[in-house]
Image: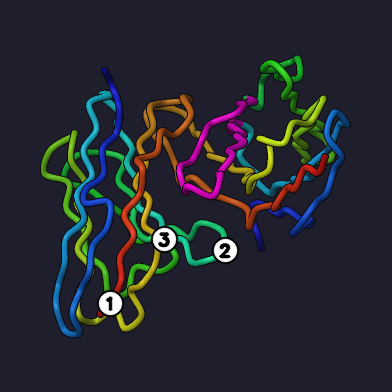
């Protein structure tokens, strides 16, 4: 079955630690996105990529990094520079004029 | 300027009634797509309906329809015969699609929390 998979579902990070959230899709989609959602809030764009080896900053890229070495994969690293990383992170992919498909999300908590 | 505006933070509707969730958008690109998503408390994003900027007819998917008024730049979601399970957050989104292979950013509104009561 085609789809988009995020892992892990829950992640705990210690202060000063980098963590990487995984996002994999087998839909052959060109575009991939990372969003952050805080409680009761909308989705804010962190990074997006329209093609392999290329990506653009979204509205809240500071403290995050991404890579797009393969079409199927778009991992997000939350660095220690991100001072308030506790949030729900959603990854999505889209083909040309298809809807965006979302993963199940990762809940990141700083401990 | 906001690309997507949802002015209703919360809406309440009685079961079996229809409800309209508002969405306006801002773009100068003649080619774009509009989307509505539902997010229940579990957090998953469920795609509901899509409208392309060149589509002549309003999109419909079961109990969902999109009231597309291009000149007003509005794309309101209409849910007919509301059900208790419709209680969720609803997001309007837009992607600008230029010519060629550019897929463009995907913009989301702040969402509308819909509560359906018996």
Distance (Cα) linking label 2 and label 1: 19 Å
**Point 78% across, 37% down: residue:** B76
Furthest residue in direction front, as rendered: B118
In the picture of the structure, the residue carrying the numbered disc 2 is A41
User: Relative to residue B42, is residue A1 depicted above or below?
Assistant: above
Helix, strand or loop for disc 2: loop
Same subunit, tags 2 and 1: yes
Which quadrant of the figure contains the N terminus of chain B?
bottom right
Residue B107 placement (x, y as % from top left)? 54, 49
- Image check: B79 left or right of A27? right
Label 2 marks which chain's residue?
A: A
**Point 22% across, 69% down: residue:** A12
Residue A58 placement (x, y as % from top left)? 40, 60
Mark 2 neighbour class, 10 Å CA radius: few under 14, some 14 to 19, many 20 or more: some
Distance (Cα) linking label 3 and label 1: 15 Å
Residue B110 placement (x, y as % from top left)? 63, 58
Distance (Cα) linking label 3 and label 2: 9 Å
- Image check: B88 left or right of B107? right
- Between discs 3 and 2, the one toward the N terminus: 3
Highlighted range, magenta: B31-51
User: Relative to residue B108, is residue A77 depicted above or below?
Assistant: below
In the picture of the structure, the residue carrying the numbered disc 1 is A110
Label 3 marks which chain's residue?
A: A
- Between discs 3 and 1, the one toward the N terminus: 3
* CB under 8 Å between discs 2 and 1: no
In the picture of the structure, the residue carrying the numbered disc 3 is A36
Q: How many marks?
A: 3
Query: Closer to the camera: disc 3 or disc 1?
Result: 1
């Amino acid at each position: 079955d085609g789809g988009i998979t995020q892992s892990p579902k829950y992640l705990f990070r210690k202060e000063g630690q980098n963590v990487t959230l995984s996002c994999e899709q087998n839909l052959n989609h060109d575009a991939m996105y990372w969003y952050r959602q805080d409680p009761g809030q909308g989705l804010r764009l962190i990074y997006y990529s329209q093609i392999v080896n290329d990506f653009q900053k979204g509205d809240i890229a500071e403290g995050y990094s991404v890579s797009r070495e393969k079409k199927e994969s778009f991992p997000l690293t939350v660095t220690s520079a991100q001072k308030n990383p506790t949030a729900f992170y959603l990854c999505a992919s889209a083909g040309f004029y298809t809807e965006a498909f979302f993963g199940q999300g990762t809940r990141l908590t700083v401990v | 300027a906001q690309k997507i505006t949802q002015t209703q933070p919360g809406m309440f509707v009685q079961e079996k009634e229809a409800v309209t969730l508002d969405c306006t958008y801002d773009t100068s690109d003649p080619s774009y797509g509009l989307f509505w998503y539902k997010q229940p408390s579990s957090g998953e994003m469920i795609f509901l309906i899509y409208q392309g900027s060149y589509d002549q007819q309003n999109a419909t998917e079961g109990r969902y329809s999109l009231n597309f008024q291009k000149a007003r730049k509005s794309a309101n979601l209409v849910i007919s015969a509301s059900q208790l399970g419709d209680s969720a957050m609803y997001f309007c989104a837009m992607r600008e699609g230029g010519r060629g292979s550019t897929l463009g950013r995907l913009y989301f509104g702040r969402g509308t929390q819909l509560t359906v009561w018996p």
